[in-house]
Amino acid sequence: MDWMYSNCSATAQRGALDWRPRFKSAVLPVFHWLYDRVASGKETARVLESTGGPNYQELLGKELAEMGNSEMWRAGKATRALRPKQAAKAISADTKGVGGRSEN
């Protein structure tokens, strides 16, 4: 978590800190509901039911397309298209964060 926060913009850091209590109170009931569904096996049953059909891939594609064509995802795609194009940075033995871990 500390790595994530330290690598965000000051705006994102400030927003995360300032809005954390409101988001926590807003999503906590959803997480309690989801936990209950996982603990009771209802989520597993839903996954098995939805993935077991012969036309699962087709239905999944429709659901994903619906989400991908939503205003939020279209806005994200348009925003990412505005990013400056840069060549990938060269990775060497001295590059930080790509060497894995020597221990956990």
Image (spheres, rainbow, N blue to C red):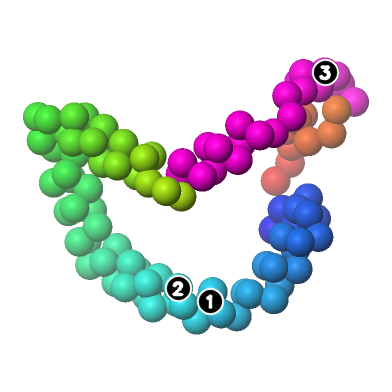
**Dot 3 lies on which element?**
loop
Q: Nearer the viewer, residue 55 or 86?
A: 86
Residue 94 at what x, y percent from top left?
Answer: 90, 26
**Quadrant position of residue 85:** top right
Q: Is residue 36 left or right of residue 68?
A: left
Query: Residue 14: where, in percent of width, then height?
Result: 75, 68
Instruction: Indicate the secondary structure of the residue bearing disc 1.
Output: helix
Please rate how many residues cluster around mark 1, counting C-alpha atoms within 10 Å: few if below 14, some from 14 to 19, many from 20: few
Instruction: Work out whether 34 lies above or below 8.
Output: below
Q: Residue at x 72, y 53 (%)?
A: 4
Residue 1 seen from this side: yes
Q: Quarter-wise, where is residue 101 in the image?
A: top right
Mark identifier at residue 24: 1
Q: Which label is found at residue 90?
A: 3
Give the Cα separation between the discs numbered 3 and 1.
Answer: 40 Å
Q: Which residues are magenta?
A: 73-94
What residue is shown with label 2? Answer: 27
Point 84% across, 34% down: residue = 96
- Quarter of the N terminus within the rendering: bottom right
